[in-house]
């Protein structure tokens, strides 16, 4: 039954949302509405062909900025970031699409997210970037057993990985990797979030040296200002990264890959691409900094992957002076036609769009009027002739209709609500079923 802790005897009933893990680790994931469970017409359409397209576009960008002809650097690997349920798109489907499209690895933030991908049958390397593997041994053991690739930045993480590896290998009923476990070392070059600083690196390298079970394959950092205009911040972070890289190599390690670039950095800074890049947002079809100049660099032609659509479920004509919604924050300045759509802030349509946002009906913008409520929102369709019950409404995405064609992107929603496209996408809640399309 939903909501109960899955036991081992119940294992056969585990579905995609309940992740079976190491013996004692139970990770419950709240269940997302599935298309077959819902009566309401509100849904997020996820276009997997666009995921493939965006990956190819990003690869094309990498191909151009890294030198020409024979001097071209070896191919930079793309490890897309699938944290937060692939930015709200549904991690298993996005991961399968990317794996089939040939990516050599994937990144997530949480151990739980890595386990979800393994449970969905993904076999490629999965980098767990967050660095927290639980308060108890079972987290580290699950990580090891599922051959996930941890990010480390503290001696204690390295020690607990080694101890879990030894245990799992010695236990007859457990299966750890037979080779050395790949790890990536995370360096804090200025973000002050996670990672070891240059000043504190000695004990971490010492712990790695005493851990022959582990192989340091990657050196990574994260850039704080790659989508901003001040290049000097990124310059300084890259300078510190180079210093730590030199230190690590002098200490006898030879990490195969260095990586620093999120979407913005991979598009703006060829000098931050190194051997591997970690784009998130761009994979989902959104350019993090379309307005920044990209002298000599290719700008990818990205296609948004997610659209949020619904239908008109109620229509009414109101006289001039009538009010709409909680708090009566909108008053009709003329006789108006008001449509109700079944999506609200609990679905991820920000309440900040009250009297500010718009949706598309018939290919034309219809303004949101009154306050967005939890489940419902009203829009003014007075200027949308022929608006009808059950008519499709686009909340996020492009619509071509009898009255024209228009698009509402996540960047526009973000602008209107004082946030960023990342938050708009990850806010689409589990109440909204994801429908996957291949074209
Ligand atoms: C989220 C994240 C990324 C991807 O960032 P985008 O801006 O979405 O491309 C890359 N690296 C790390 C460490 C992250 O946390």
Image: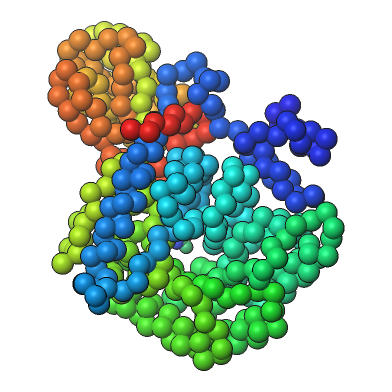
Residue 296 appears at what percent x and percent y? Answer: 15, 67
Q: Quadrant of the N terminus?
A: top right
Residue 272 against residue 311 in the figure, above or below: below
The colour scheme of the drawn protein is rainbow
**In the image, is 439 to the left or to the right of 189?**
left
194 or 376, nearer to the observer: 194
Camera-side residue of 200 and 118? 118
Q: Is residue 169 left or right of residue 308?
A: right
Seen from the viewer's position, the closer of residues 85 and 318 is: 85
Residue at the extreme front: 70
Q: Tell me the quarter of the picture where residue 372 sits.
A: top left
What residue is at 56 percent from the left and 32 percent from the top? 32
Nearer to us in this view, 57 or 376: 57
Residue 172 x, y percent position in the rendering: 85, 58
Tag count: 0
In this orientation, does residue 439 appear?
yes
Q: Which image quarter: residue 140?
A: bottom right
Quadrant of the rendered image holding ligand 1: bottom left
The residue at 49%/35% (across/down) is 429
**Which quadrant is the C terminus positioned in?**
top left
Q: Residue at x 24, y 68 (%)?
A: 65
Residue 368, percent across and down?
29, 27
């Amino acid at each position: 039954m939903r909501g109960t802790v899955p036991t081992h005897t119940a294992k056969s009933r585990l579905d995609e949302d309940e992740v079976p893990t190491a013996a004692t680790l139970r990770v419950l994931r709240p269940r997302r509405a599935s298309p077959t469970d819902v009566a309401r017409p509100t849904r997020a359409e996820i276009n997997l062909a666009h995921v493939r397209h965006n990956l190819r576009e990003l690869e094309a960008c990498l191909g151009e900025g890294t030198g020409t002809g024979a001097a071209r650097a070896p191919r930079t690997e793309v490890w897309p970031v699938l944290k937060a349920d692939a930015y709200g798109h549904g991690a298993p489907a996005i991961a399968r699409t990317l794996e089939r499209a040939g990516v050599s690895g994937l990144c997530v933030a949480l151990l739980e997210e890595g386990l979800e991908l393994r449970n969905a049958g993904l076999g490629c390397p999965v980098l767990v970037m967050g660095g927290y593997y639980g308060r108890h041994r079972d987290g580290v053991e699950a990580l090891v057993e599922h051959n996930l690739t941890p990010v480390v930045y503290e001696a204690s993480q390295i020690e607990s990985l080694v101890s879990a590896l030894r245990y799992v290998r010695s236990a007859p009923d457990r299966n750890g990797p037979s080779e050395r476990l790949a790890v990536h070392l995370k360096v804090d070059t200025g973000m002050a979030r996670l990672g070891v600083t240059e000043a504190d690196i000695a004990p971490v390298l010492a712990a790695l040296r005493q851990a022959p079970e582990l192989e340091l394959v990657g050196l990574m950092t994260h850039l704080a200002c790659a989508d901003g205009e001040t290049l000097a911040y990124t310059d300084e972070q890259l300078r510190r990264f180079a210093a730590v890289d030199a230190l690590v190599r002098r200490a006898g390690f030879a990490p195969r890959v260095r990586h620093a670039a999120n979407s913005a950095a991979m598009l703006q800074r060829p000098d931050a691409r190194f051997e591997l890049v970690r784009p998130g947002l761009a994979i989902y079809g959104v350019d993090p900094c379309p307005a920044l100049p990209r002298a000599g660099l290719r700008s990818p032609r990205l296609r948004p992957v997610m659209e949020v659509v619904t239908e008109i479920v109620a229509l009414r004509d109101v006289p001039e002076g009538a009010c709409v919604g909680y708090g009566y924050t909108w008053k009709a300045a003329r006789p108006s036609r008001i449509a109700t759509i079944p999506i609200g802030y609990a679905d991820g349509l920000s309440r900040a769009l009250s009297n500010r946002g718009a949706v598309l009906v018939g290919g034309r913008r219809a303004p949101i009027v009154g306050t967005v409520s939890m489940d419902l929102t009203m829009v003014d369709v007075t200027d949308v002739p022929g608006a009808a019950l059950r008519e499709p409404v686009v909340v996020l995405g492009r619509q071509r209709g009898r009255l024209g064609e228009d698009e509402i992107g996540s960047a526009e929603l973000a602008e209107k609500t004082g946030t960023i496209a990342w938050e708009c996408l990850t806010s689409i809640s589990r109440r909204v079923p994801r429908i996957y399309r291949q074209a």
